[in-house]
Amino acid sequence: EAGVAQSPRYKIIEKRQSVAFWCNPISGHATLYWYQQILGQGPKLLIQFQNNGVVDDSQLPKDRFSAERLKGVDSTLKIQPAKLEDSAVYLCASSLDGRAVYGYTFGSGTRLTVV
Amino acid sequence: DQQVKQNSPSLSVQEGRISILNCDYTNSMFDYFLWYKKYPAEGPTFLISISSIKDKNEDGRFTVFLNKSAKHLSLHIVPSQPGDSAVYFCAASEVEETSGSRLTFGEGTQLTVNP
């Protein structure tokens, strides 16, 4: 089966600019996650979708970050305006139905550098 | 509040020897644990998991041990191979079977296996 697709792979922007990331999960996977991984740290959950509804966005900085999952398939994560501390790898993952026993499949991530 | 901790940022072992990666957690509600491996410029890939009702799970060269009373788990790799060199993340989930569970990750341990 095809994996989780993410684009772009790399992005460099200046602070206060906006940026968007795209994720296409594995076909049929109902649950989609966005994680932020800062260098030297483990991935941190930003938002979790179940189909096209938000399950958990408690750690999403909502003043600058937004995410949507239209029609329960693809998802976009946006940052506006970006700050230097947003420099990180943004990982998208999908799961059959959110149950840990089935595991989560991660994409290769988007490396964001804010200068 | 770091609920999942990997206290060793790095570990170096000789090819053929055993690699032991450790992980501690504080949240007693965690009941499913996973190990992920991450190569540079790739997303984390699932390695092995264990339910809280077990104390050991084995898959080929990889064995995960869980000590619930100590809130500690470890990953053993025997024998270690140079291709095992990667960052290993410990992750925990609060609910195993219910839809909507999410993973909390440790900081990761960089394993280097020397030929």
Image (cartoon, rainbow, N blue to C red):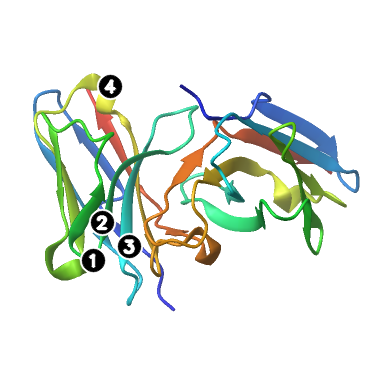
**Which tag, 3 or 4, sits closer to the chain's start?**
3
- Is there CB contact under 8 Å for labels 2 and 3? yes
Specify the label residue A85 is tagged with: 4
Q: Where's residue B11, x and y in %?
A: 74, 30
Whether discs 4 and 1 lie on one chain: the answer is yes
Q: Amino acid at mark 2?
A: Phe
* Badge 4 element: helix
The residues tagged by marks 2 and 3 sit, at their Cα atoms, a distance apart of 6 Å
- Mark 3 or mark 4, which is nearer to you? 3
Q: Amino acid at mark 1?
A: Asn
Packing grade of label 1 (10 A; few <14, some 14-19, many >=20) is some
Q: Is residue A30 left or right of residue B14?
A: left
Q: Where's residue A22, x and y in %?
A: 21, 55
Packing grade of label 3 (10 A; few <14, some 14-19, many >=20) is many
- Is there CB contact under 8 Å for labels 2 and 1? yes
Host chain of mark 4: A
Report the residue marked by disc 2: A49
Q: Where's residue B20, x and y in %?
A: 80, 39
Q: Amino acid at mark 4?
A: Glu
The structure residue drawn at horizontal position 65% and vertical position 34%, both measured from the top left corner, is B110
Specify the label residue A51 is tagged with: 1
Q: Foreground: B103 or B96?
A: B96
- Is there CB contact under 8 Å for labels 3 and 1? no
- Mark 4 or mark 1, which is nearer to you? 1
Please identify the quadrant where the C terminus of chain B is shown.
top right
Report the residue marked by disc 3: A31
The residues tagged by marks 2 and 4 sit, at their Cα atoms, a distance apart of 24 Å
* Badge 3 element: strand
Q: Is residue A96 left or right of residue A63?
A: right
- Is there CB contact under 8 Å for labels 4 and 1? no
Q: Quadrant of residue A107?
A: bottom left
The structure residue drawn at horizontal position 40% and vertical position 70%, both measured from the top left corner, is A96
